[in-house]
Structure formats: C-alpha cells, structure tokens
Image (spheres, rainbow, N blue to C red):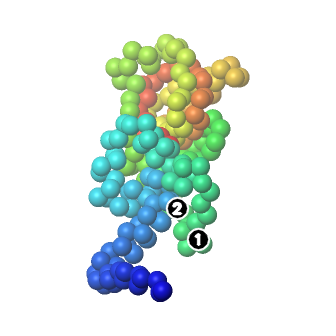
Amino acid sequence: LGRPPKPRTPPLPSKMASTIRNLLALAAVCALLPAATAFSAFPAVSGSLAGARATHACTLRRGLPLAAARGQRAEAPAIMQLKAKGPRALHTEFTVEKATPEQLEELSVKNWGVWSTAGSPKYKVGIKSPLKTYDCNELSYIISGKMEITPTATGVPVLVQAGDFVTFPDGFPCHWFVIEEIKKSYYIY
C-alpha cells in the first residue's frame, strides 16, 4: 500500500514571484531602518501614516526599527548601517547644543513639523509655564526666540535660543520660561 501522491503546487508565474520577492525586500528594509526613514523612503506608505494618531503609530513615530518595536532584536546588514538622511535621535538625555548646517541638512530639519508659542496660554512671554512632562522623545530645532528650560531634577535654568537643538527625553519634567516668542521645528520619536 503506497502513499497517495502529494498534490503538486503549480509554480508561480515569474512576474508574481518577482513581485513577492520585491515585497519581501521592502518588508526587510522597513524592519531594519528606523520607521521614519523607512516610510519616508516609500512615499506611498508615508502619506497614510503621516497623520496617524493611533497608539500603535506612536511606536512607529518613535523611530525604532520595527523588529525592536515588537521586542525582537534586529541587526542591519553592513550595507544598511550607512547613515540614513532624515530625522533621528541625537541624545538620550536632556541636551542643548548648537546645530551645524551639516546636521540641519543631514536630519532634514526643513521637513519637520513647526510649532510656535504664539497665542499659547501656557507659554506666554515672561511667565513661568506650568509643569510639562514629555510623553514622547522629542528633538527640537529652535528657529527663532529664546527661553529658559528648568528641569525639575536640577532646578537650574538652561538657556535655549535660535540655532539650538534641544533633546527632550520621554518622561522629562520641566518648566519653560519664554523670554522671546519661540518658533521651533520638532521631530517626535
């Protein structure tokens, strides 16, 4: 008594196989690059996620490789370890530093969102703001204006002004004291 013959799966047409290979390659790229870089590299996808506000989108906005967001460790092949142009974290702690023209270009700051203290009841010129605790990591570039940021941990004001990058880590509590109306570009990750 022999076994019944296994049903044979017909081979995929070459065009379909090529499409599947391309989709798998795209998935691999998206899993290895920071989300913002991966989605900016594929405009058809980035438009649909650009305004996402869902909780799962926060993981993508944070710029983690998708595999890391799922709790897995992903190592990029050597070719993928080149510095990608686009937004990325500069530091993990609260930091203020002067931006260079090279950094502005490399991080594509001109494509970031823009926000201003103009008209904000919490951030009026000459008044200490209520306590602000960051709920995401943020890298800001100060386009214009001047303020002092006082971390609650130290109580020591830090001057921030036009031309500065400011790294605000997730969970960072501080007060703002706006000296001149602030206009900033920002990247949330």
Instruction: Give the class, few, some or many, for how many residues have Cα within 10 Å of label 1's Cα (few <14, many ≥20).
Output: few
Camera sees residue 20: yes
Q: CA distance from mark 1 to mark 2?
A: 9 Å
> Where residue 135 appears, x then y in whole percent?
52, 30
Residue type, numbered disc 2: Leu
Q: Which of the two discs, 1 and 2, labels the residue nearer the N terminus?
A: 2
Q: Residue at x 35, y 41 (%)?
A: 52
Res. 134 image quadrant: top right
Callout 2: SS: helix
Residue type, numbered disc 1: Pro
Q: Residue at x 52, y 35 (%)?
A: 136
Q: What residue did someone put label 2 on?
A: 32
CB atoms at circles 1 and 2 under 8 Å apart?
A: yes
Q: Residue at x 30, y 49 (%)?
A: 48
Res. 44 image quadrant: bottom left
Camera sees residue 163: no
Farthest-out residue, right: 154
Q: What residue did someone put label 1 on?
A: 77
Query: Closest to the observer: 24 or 57?
Result: 24
